[in-house]
Amino acid sequence: GAVVSQHPSWVICKSGTSVKIECRSLDFQATTMFWYRQFPKQSLMLMATSNEGSKATYEQGVEKDKFLINHASLTLSTLTVTSAHPEDSSFYICSARRQGFLGTEAFFGQGTRLTVV
Amino acid sequence: RKEVEQDPGPFNVPEGATVAFNCTYSNSASQSFFWYRQDCRKEPKLLMSVYSSGNEDGRFTAQLNRASQYISLLIRDSKLSDSATYLCVVNPFEDQFYFGTGTSLTVIP
């Protein structure tokens, strides 16, 4: 079963509105979660690293005031796309790492397909 | 130079064929390597980890060549259900994962 749950799976919103995406680790605690964005026919691009109890770390070129990240608990991180525009339409995926016997394994949420109209 | 480079394909192969993907990485200190599978509009899912000695899981074989800094994935006896995008992932640091662009595979009846 899924170990990382992401919600919603898809959302359509009007330009100028804000959208919140939730990412939950279901059976383990994740002090760090990662947010990726994927445009069609492109690879996953890391947007930011979400740290529980502290500020997120954003990758170069990602606007922190536009993509608000909150990691208030060990099992939940949220990404809010503020004042969304059509160019923000993309597939957003969160990820959390879990330490196993053979090393660190990355688990992904189901992804959120955002369409801004 | 990109951290991870991968041929995007597409690879179109008939059922039953053997197909191989390669992926090169730039950080020679990288320790962990993975192949993920991503179906259209879905999240990536771990297919297999890549170990130094190479590893096999059914029809799938993963190899690591540290000298040339590449990893490979071999799929034997391709099935229609193998059609997907295969992402190679390199983990050079504790919390840093780098993804290739993915290789698109279509298995044709």
Image (cartoon, coloured by chain):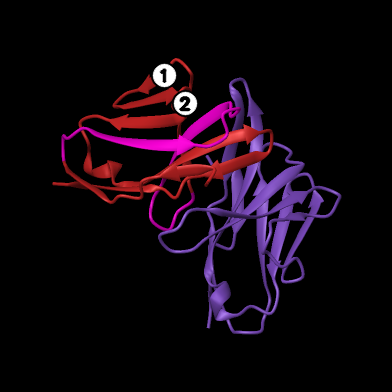
Residue B29, how many percent across, how many down?
Answer: 61, 27
Q: Is residue B79 above or below residue B31?
A: below
Residue B56, how many percent across, how many down?
Answer: 37, 21
Q: Would you say residue A64 is visible in this rendering?
A: yes
Q: Is residue A67 magenta?
A: no
Q: Is residue B38 magenta?
A: yes
Q: Which mark is residue B54?
A: 1
Q: Residues within 10 Å of mark 1 (few under 14, many from 20)?
A: some
Give the residue at x 62% y 20%: A101
Q: Which residues are magenta?
A: B15-43
Query: How many labels, in total?
Result: 2
**Discs 1, 2 touching: Cβ within 8 Å:** yes
Q: Amino acid at mark 1?
A: Gly
User: Quick one: which residue is furthest to the top in this view?
Assistant: B53
In terms of secondary structure, where does tag 1 sit? loop
On the image, numbered disc 2 is attached to which residue?
B50
Q: Chain of mark 2?
A: B
Give the residue at x 47% y 26%: B50
Q: Amino acid at mark 2?
A: Val
In terms of secondary structure, where does tag 2 sit? strand
